[in-house]
Image (cartoon, rainbow, N blue to C red):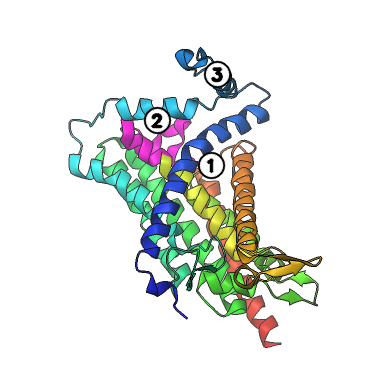
């Protein structure tokens, strides 16, 4: 039977769909975060951006009035503002590096999602397609390698701006991201030992087994400490509160992107939300079964399965698993918003102490304990 390799455009099609999906979700997430922050602070939230002439249309005016009241027009206004705003570059800045830095920050955030499986294998005619852009043998190492490029964007942005506050923010960002990347990698080693693979697809499929015939063998069940450590380290990588010391406005104005405006600032802003999506997708794949539904084998998406005497086709199971993945990702994105608007900013020394003196030793201890349990 032909495999996905028989369809050379498959990877391009999947990459395009994933890219547009992430780009489309990013402005929606800005609106969602404003609503979450308004709920946390007991206020209305965004409801001022309106399109009056659309609201006066006879048939669809009511719809646009509703969208204005709930604030969904604000992301559109933000995008238009950033696209049309003046692109300011300081006189003594390194203009080439100043322009390249936002791209260096944004591109790794996008391409990292390529190895995250977002659905089961499906059958299209005689071809089996993976709902994954790139099924690499070293998928998780690919993610760590690309995420290690992100500090360059922040460091170069701060250095090229020729601004002391930007440089301080760049140094903070670089130190923080490198520190927590070490913790993130160490906390995931226990999973590799248990599932015996670096491929995310194999790790997800390994979680469909049952412990004692009842409990799904999800990563959070077999590695509960690693699940906590990985989430904390990966969240710190996104540089969002309470880990937002690189852009601590009360101390260093706005950190490494102080001298950025217009769409260049928008790229840094977009990269932050894309990193949240990637973190949620990766975390779900490693610790919460990915696209798997508890007690539903992934193979049902290919063969179909009868339920209560009614045959459910494979594509229905595939859609259900895709929906399960999206719901899990949405939950952990929501959790990140809750953390952002609940905890105050850490001091820089607290951020470093947490990474090197607490998370890293616990990650190394988790590796040792996992090895001893597997040996026993």
The residue lying at 25 percent from left, 46 percent from top is 100
Q: What element carries label 2?
A: helix
Q: In this view, does 183 lie above or below 39?
A: below
User: Residue 21: x and y, percent?
Assistant: 47, 47
Q: What residue is pinned by disc 1?
A: 347
Q: In this view, does 236 lie to the left or right of 35?
A: left
Whichever of callouts 1 and 3 sits on the residue coming sooner in the sequence is 3
Q: What element carries label 3?
A: loop
Q: How far apart are marks 3 and 2 (CA)?
A: 27 Å
Q: What residue is pinned by disc 3?
A: 59
The magenta segment is 244-269
Badge number at residue 79: 2
Task: Please say whether residue 239 is one of the residues in the magenta stretch.
Answer: no
The residue lying at 70 percent from left, 81 percent from top is 373
Q: Is residue 125 left or right of residue 207?
A: left
- The answer to which of 130 and 211 lies nearer the viewer is 130
Q: How many labels does the image show?
A: 3
């Amino acid at each position: 039977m032909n495999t996905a390799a028989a369809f050379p455009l498959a990877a391009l099609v999947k990459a395009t769909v994933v890219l547009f999906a992430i780009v489309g979700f990013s402005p929606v997430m800005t609106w969602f975060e404003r609503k979450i922050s308004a709920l946390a602070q007991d206020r209305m939230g965004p409801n001022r951006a309106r399109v009056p002439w659309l609201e006066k249309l006879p048939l669809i005016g009511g719809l646009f009035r509703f969208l204005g009241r709930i604030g969904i027009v604000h992301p559109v206004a933000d995008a238009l503002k950033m696209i049309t705003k003046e692109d300011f570059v300081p006189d003594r800045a390194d203009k080439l590096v100043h322009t390249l830095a936002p791209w260096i920050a944004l591109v790794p955030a996008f391409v990292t999602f390529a190895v995250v499986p977002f659905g089961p294998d499906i059958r299209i005619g005689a071809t089996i397609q993976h709902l994954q852009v790139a099924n690499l043998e070293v998928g998780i190492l690919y993610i760590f390698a690309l995420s290690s490029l992100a500090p360059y964007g922040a460091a170069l942005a701060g250095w090229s701006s020729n601004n002391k506050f930007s440089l301080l923010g760049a140094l903070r960002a670089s130190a923080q991201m490198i520190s927590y990347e070490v913790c993130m990698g160490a906390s995931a080693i226990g999973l590799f030992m248990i599932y015996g693979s670096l491929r995310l697809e194999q790790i997800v499929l390994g979680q469909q087994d049952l412990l004692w015939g009842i409990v799904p063998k999800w990563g959070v069940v077999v590695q509960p400490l690693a699940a906590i450590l990985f989430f904390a380290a990966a969240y710190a990588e996104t540089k969002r509160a309470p880990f937002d010391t690189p852009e601590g406005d009360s101390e260093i104005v706005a950190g490494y992107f102080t001298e950025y405006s217009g769409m260049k600032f928008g790229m840094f802003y977009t990269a932050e939300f894309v990193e949240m999506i990637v973190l949620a997708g990766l975390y779900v794949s490693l610790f919460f079964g990915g696209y798997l539904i508890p007690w539903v084998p992934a193979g049902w998406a290919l063969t179909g399965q009868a339920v209560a005497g009614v045959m459910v086709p494979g594509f229905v199971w595939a859609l259900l698993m895709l929906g399960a993945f999206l719901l899990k990702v949405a939950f952990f994105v929501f959790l990140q918003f809750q953390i952002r608007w609940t905890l105050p900013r850490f001091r820089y020394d607290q951020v470093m102490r947490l990474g090197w003196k607490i998370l890293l030793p616990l990650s190394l201890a988790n590796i040792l304990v996992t090895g001893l349990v597997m040996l026993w």
